[in-house]
Amino acid sequence: MAYKKEESFDEKVTAGLIENYRGAIELLGEDPEREGLLKTPERMAKAMQYLTQGYGLDAKAILNGAKFTEAYSEMVIVKDIELYSMCEHHMLPFFGKAHVAYIPNGYITGLSKIARVVDVFSRRMQVQERLTHQILDAIQETLEPQGVAVVIEAQHLCMMMRGVSKQNSVTTTSAFSGQFEHAATRAEFMKLISSDLISRR
Ligand SMILES: Nc1nc2c(ncn2[C@@H]2O[C@H](COP(=O)(O)OP(=O)(O)OP(=O)(O)O)[C@@H](O)[C@H]2O)c(=O)[nH]1
Ligand SMILES: [Zn+2]
């Protein structure tokens, strides 16, 4: 996506974050004046703005920007969209894959826009459940399709690096609307996202 370049970050926000991160580094027992850490508060300030830039992006505008009239009314699935987000409880990353489908009702959207919408909502402080619903709602409300399905599988560093320290747990969340509320349609979607057609060629 058109990710923000570092130099486009708001100067005031960057300056404030630098100040805060310098303090945090000191409180954690490090010396922010030592050579290797001199630029670290600034790097952190920019990295965090990058990782939360979704607040400034409009998912509906992205989808509407490539909304095309089309009679196709079968399921469209974009699967294995990698995502990186930040858990809002610990500000630690969670990462994994999103699988998104919709059944058009007169309109389709550019395929890349589905992946961009995943990024818009991932690049924020999140919980996986809300992220799942926000993706679904944005697609439902702009394309007004016959249905939307979103499945996210993710690993949370807050459960891996600290706390309960479970290295292999994967959290799956899902949200369905319209036609996907019917068992048969949902089953078809689940079967298709579980298949591995490309790699079997
Ligand atoms: N539902 C949900 N919970 C999350 C997500 N990311 C992190 N969490 C959980 O948020 C909870 C916060 O619980 P607290 O008891 O307040 O925090 P904590 O003492 O750090 O919890 P532990 O991680 O168990 O040590 C933890 O159980 C996390 O595993 C998410 O995306 N969705
Ligand atoms: Zn967490």
Image (cartoon, rainbow, N blue to C red):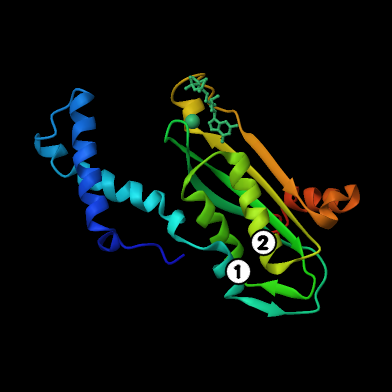
Side (left or right) of 183 relative to 189: right
Q: Is mark 1 on a helix, strand or loop?
A: helix
At label 1, which amino acid type do we have? Leu
| Circles 1 and 2 in contact, beta carbons < 8 Å | yes
Q: Mark 1 points at which residue?
A: 63
Q: Of all residues shown, which one is farthest toward the top?
A: 164
Q: In this view, does 161 lie above or below 6?
A: above
Q: Name the residue under label 2.
A: 139
Q: Residue at x 71, y 43 (%)?
A: 174
> Nearest the camera: 174 or 60?
60
Q: In which quarter of the image is residue 143?
A: bottom right
Residues packed near mark 1 inside 10 Å, few (<14), some (14 to 19) or many (20 plus): many
Q: Residue at x 63, y 40 (%)?
A: 129
Q: Residue at x 81, y 79 (%)?
A: 71
The x, y position of residue 121, in whole percent, is: 53, 52
Q: Residue at x 82, y 67 (%)?
A: 74
> Nearest the camera: 20 or 43?
20
The x, y position of residue 29, in whole percent, is: 19, 22
The x, y position of residue 160, in whole percent, is: 49, 26
Q: In which quarter of the image is the C terminus?
A: bottom right
In the image, the residue with mark 1 has its CB under 8 Å from the nearest atom of ligand 1:
no
Q: Is residue 87 above or below residue 191?
A: above
The x, y position of residue 185, in whole percent, is: 86, 54
Q: What element carries label 2?
A: helix
- Label 1 to label 2, Cα distance in Å? 7 Å
- Identify the disc placed on residue 189: none
Q: In which quarter of the image is residue 7?
A: bottom left
First in sequence, mark 1 or 2: give its number.
Answer: 1
